[in-house]
Image (cartoon, coloured by chain):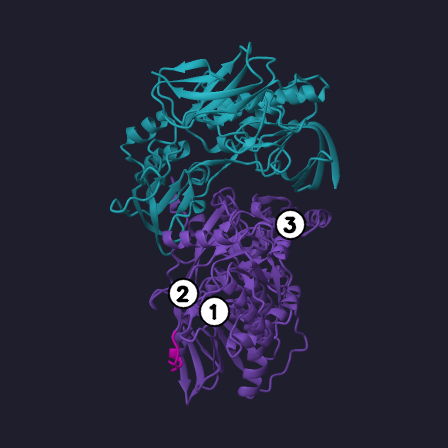
Amino acid sequence: MRRENVDVLIIGGGAAGLAAAIEAKKFGVKTLLLERDRSTGGVLNQCIHNGFGLHVFKAELTGPEFMEKLWEELGNLDEVIRNNYTVLKIDPEKKEVITLSEEGIVVFKPKALIMATGARERPLNSLRIPGSRVAGVFTAGVAQKMVNIYNRLPGNRVLIVGSGDIGLIMARRLKIEGMDVVGVVEIMPEPGGLIRNVVQCLDDFNIPLWLSHTVFKIHGKERLEGVTIGKVDENFKPIPGTERFLEVDTLVASVGLIPQNELIEDFVEMDAINRGPVVDDLMRTSVEWIFAAGNNVAIHDLVDFVYEEGKIAGENAAKYVLGEKLPEVKYRFERGDNVGVLLPQKFTGSQPFKMYVRSRKSLEKSAISFSGRTIRKFNWKIRPSEMIDLVVKNFEGLPKEILVEVNQID
Amino acid sequence: MKVFVIGAGITGSLITRELSKYDLEVHVIEKAPDIGWGVTKANSAIVHGGYDDPPESVRAKFAAPGNEMYDKLSKELEFDFLRTGSYVIAFKREDVEYLKKLKERGMKNGVTNLEILTAKELKEKEPNLNEEIIAALWCPTAGITEPWEVSIAAIENAQENGAIVHLGEKVTDIIVQNQRVKKILTDKGEYDADIVINAAGLFADEIAKMAGIGDFEIFPRKGEYILLDEKLKGLVNAVIFPTPTKKSKGILVVPTVDGGILLGPNAVDLPKDQKENLETTRDGLNEVYEKSRKLVPKIDLSYTVKTFAGLRPETKDKDFIIGATKVWGFINVAGIRSPGLTAAPAIAKYIAEKVLSEDLGLNLSKKLDFNPYRRKIPHLNDSNLKEWEELVKKDPSFGRTVCFCNNVSEGEILEAIRRGARTLDGVKFRTRASFGRCQGGFCSLKILEIISRELSIPLEEIKQNYENSWIIKGKVRP
């Protein structure tokens, strides 16, 4: 078993991990990024549509273009990136990261660790939909990879389940490539993805979106032969009499993303709602030497935000390694009315920082408040599917425990 | 002497392996494209203690002896087997009376180590059970395994010892002359046969009819299951049964060998023509949830990995039908419902030593060079890291992870293909790749790619499991 010492070790080579590497390297510390796949970039590789980079590069890039920008920024990739390294275990006491690769077992001993392990798709199997278990049921990400990387089509006639962004993107993609896209069912009364994707991917291609609808039953013997869909009530219970049979041979599911934290969740303080580690504005977790950034912290809407977070984590991990005294946490957010995803959960008050909040319901006109003090008003409709981002820079008079609320205003 | 076993489920597989110990030409014919894809694939995966079968039943004759054979068998065939023990729990006074009856019945069946525990004793060992439980029957010898793996292991070992395996081949008729088995006809050919062993699971009645034996029928009884994530490892440490009903052992909470938690099954009797109905239902899954939650209130369905249904081959008498028939050479091993997995090794031995040797009077001689050992496909989670590193040094493909949820390497997938996997399910049941929490999201395309490369077949031709379970339609553009 080979051992290797390193200053900053990053696990995961998606947008967050690459951004963290770029930033950490700037400080001259020995930086290494472990990627379990054949190459870095994560899901960007298969996202050949555009719309990436508007915030950070002021350009509308495709996924691979965005990725190449990061590679350029990083410079000599071979020096920093180790592809095909799977992390088996993190030992929090010994501060060791145990990996498997063609090299065998390598134990890394980093001074700081950045978790950038991203998210995985929730499989349709986990939703307990009644009926058969048949071939022809894919997650949107798998269908996307099949079409964009493998140059293969999954079937002839498809129903998209769930209106998350990848689901919407895939509805359009499969339609363009000649599949019969019968529609999109969404169990919630509102779309799960960005409104711009509903317009550009469904409306522009005459693909119906059935809200408050779900799959009641999966039919077929070996390959999918059809589904029964129908309407659900406000408790998501099927409404009898609303059933309708759709003959499809393919289901593509976009029913949620799950932050991946299996490596750290047993010893790092976790946030049950974000399903990620509790972090501060420097992207530190509850364990001093472990930082985290990206979709493993909470599911973000835009890769730009993930990239920014990665940079913060990279900078502060490097400073930590260099022995710089990082500011201490002074404030903590508590969730109040209508607050779902929220990050960071605590902050130092040493510098302005961006915070992200998801409202639990849609509100026509609303305001976000800190312990009763209105911080920002929204004159447009806010939705659970669109994360609110705001820069917090004025800390004067804030209590140590800040109650965050999102409320309807007149 | 030519022996044909029909069906490569758990019983057929273990019989094939048992007979491969002797100087016989042994064939096994399975209509599915792979081993253990029928009843064997979807059940509670429990090696029962053997205490609860009626003492006069055929089931009782094989259950406890079968259980005892699992230690040696699991070592020879290298499959996972854990003696977790089991509890039957009691909520009411009359349930406790029933536990006493079960204990007595166990004594009659030769299961002598049963113990009735108080609620306090139970809580020390299983802290997550319902607080209202007042007592439990503890059976230390019950265990868990992976039935499909037992089947695959047995067939691999039988092959090693000369057995001939026919997969994806369906028996269409059995020719009987002068009340003696003569030939087997299949959709692929015909074979002279001296002995036919009918281990055809749900279809054993139809096979028997081909030989002119129509004295029993098999009814499908469906059971639905919910599998929960291995994050819940330790929620229960042993198999948890409710007090049984007349119909079945009830809905259980079972740890799986890889750390998950299995809930189920319910029991729904289906008409005879629904032997392929593997649909789950809303009501069924709700029943599984409600009843399992009564045993373990902490059960949280947000940890669901998947749901599935299995069928049990039930007979009128709810008992096994095992033995010779009026047609010389035609032997039934039918109605192997619960505790079939438990009983199977003992049934296999009985077929060789009693039915063939005594009832049919065959003078079987044992092969001198029988090799009882089958090596499993190596797996990282079972080995220590140093051993695994040595393996990687010899073959770097064991250092390339394909399935991240279960840490399955490319080397394991290549080995599964070498051993006969031709489909995604073939790989999955041999390696656990795509069995985990992401359900193949990260690895299924990579596995397709590896199968395609290794067998030189286009991606489009690789199936999930059966002939019509295609995965990819074709190229987006040439």
Name the image quarter holding the N terminus of chain A: top right
Chain letter for the part of the structure drawn in cyan: A
A200 on left or right of A148? left
Q: Which numbered disc, 3 or 2, marks the residue closer to the eye?
A: 2
Chain letter for the part of the structure drawn in purple: B
Q: Which residue is mark 2?
A: B221
Tell me the chief SS of the magenta region. loop
> Which of disc 1 and disc 3 is earlier in sequence?
1
Same chain letter for marks 2 and 1:
yes
- Residue B251 appears in the rendering: yes
Q: Position of residue B425 (x, y in %)?
A: 49, 54
Say which mark, if any, is on residue B337: 1
Q: Are marks 2 and 1 in contact (CB under 8 Å)?
A: yes
> Which of disc 2 and disc 3 is earlier in sequence?
2
User: CA separation, marks 3 and 1?
Assistant: 32 Å
Q: Position of residue B146 (x, y in %)?
A: 56, 59
Same chain letter for marks 3 and 2:
yes
Q: Quadrant of residue A252?
A: top left
